[in-house]
Image (spheres, rainbow, N blue to C red):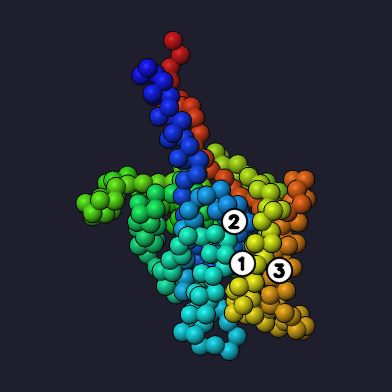
Amino acid sequence: MLVRLASLAIVMVAAAWAQGPVLVITPSARDAVMGAGGTLALMAQEGRPIYVVVFGNEEKASVKLGPAETRLANNEEGERALKALGAKEVMNLGHKSGELAQLSSSEMRNQVMAMMRLYKPEILFFPDWYTHFLDDNDIYWVGRMAEEAPYGGGSLFLQEMTYLGYPGAAARQYYFFSPYRPYREKEGGEGQAVMKQVDISGALDKKLSALAEMKTSNEAWADELARRSGRKLDGTEQVRAYATEMAETVGARHRMRYAEEFNHLRPVGGIPAHVRERARAK
């Protein structure tokens, strides 16, 4: 009887984790939607609560708007976009975009650890800072900091939160996402990580609709491209075409119509390597 009860408890815990919460850490709403929007939409359809923490205030991505107007427009449009994917809550921390390297990494990590204690996610999404392909320090610093944050999952970190009733917590799966281009050959997936592909054929329309919500930053991106090419471009159409082509390119490599891919870490069974190396043969 005790064995059967124990087995039932294990099954119940596994089922709870199977539909556990998702926490997304991102410099901007655009980065998360472009890099993982289809997968997040599919996870929301599974019934997972999705929580998004946006570190940057997005005050610079606009055409002919001041910083305050730009921040308000991008925050409102980004929240609509993320909620169109199924996000339950979007939190804007309001740090100055383009200047996140000036923040203390410990301060940012503490904020992520606090969010993990609050939401208790099973899955954590954040930008892949190992792929050095963008002149974007915000993506680098947020990705690097977010990967380090789970190390503080024990109750000895942020003890003030433990006293407030929020004990240590950390995710069990980690999705590193590449926001603006597919992974290159042999890039990512090192060590215990593996490359994971997600078929988003049934969620691409939702991802494109979410991207269309971000009109202010879409216009800014199109304006930058127009200055380089000398051609006037429609921001929303440009973003939709870019996201579709990226999903097609990733999908073609894995015999899918449209896909997203991630550097994926998950629990690994067995005895850890640092213990095995001290083992002695009998």
Q: Which residue is mark 1?
A: 210
Q: Position of residue 68 (x, y in %)?
A: 46, 84
Q: Position of residue 239 (x, y in %)?
A: 69, 70
Mark 3 surroundings within 10 Å by alpha-carbon count, few (fewer than 14), some (14 through 19), many (20 or more): many
Mark pair 3, 1: CA separation: 10 Å
Mark 1 surroundings within 10 Å by alpha-carbon count, few (fewer than 14), some (14 through 19), many (20 or more): many
Report if residue 121 is visible in the image: yes
Give, as a three-letter code, the residue at label 2.
Ala
Give, as a three-letter code, the residue at label 1.
Ala
Q: Quadrant of the N terminus?
A: top left
Mark pair 2, 1: CA separation: 10 Å
Q: Secondary structure at mark 3?
A: helix
Mark 3 or 1, closer to the camera: 1
Earlier sequence position, callout 3 versus callout 1:
1
Q: Which residue is mark 3?
A: 240
Q: Secondary structure at mark 2?
A: helix
Of residues 202 and 67, the one drawn nearer to the viewer in this rendering: 202
Of residues 51 and 187, the one drawn nearer to the viewer in this rendering: 51
Residue at 47% in and 45% down: 20
Q: Which residue is mark 2?
A: 41
Residue at 57% in and 64% down: 84
Do the numbered discs 2 and 1 sit on residues whose CB atoms are within 8 Å? Answer: yes
Q: Position of residue 252 (x, y in %)?
A: 78, 50
Looking at the rendered structure, which numbered label has been put on residue 154? none
Earlier sequence position, callout 3 versus callout 2:
2
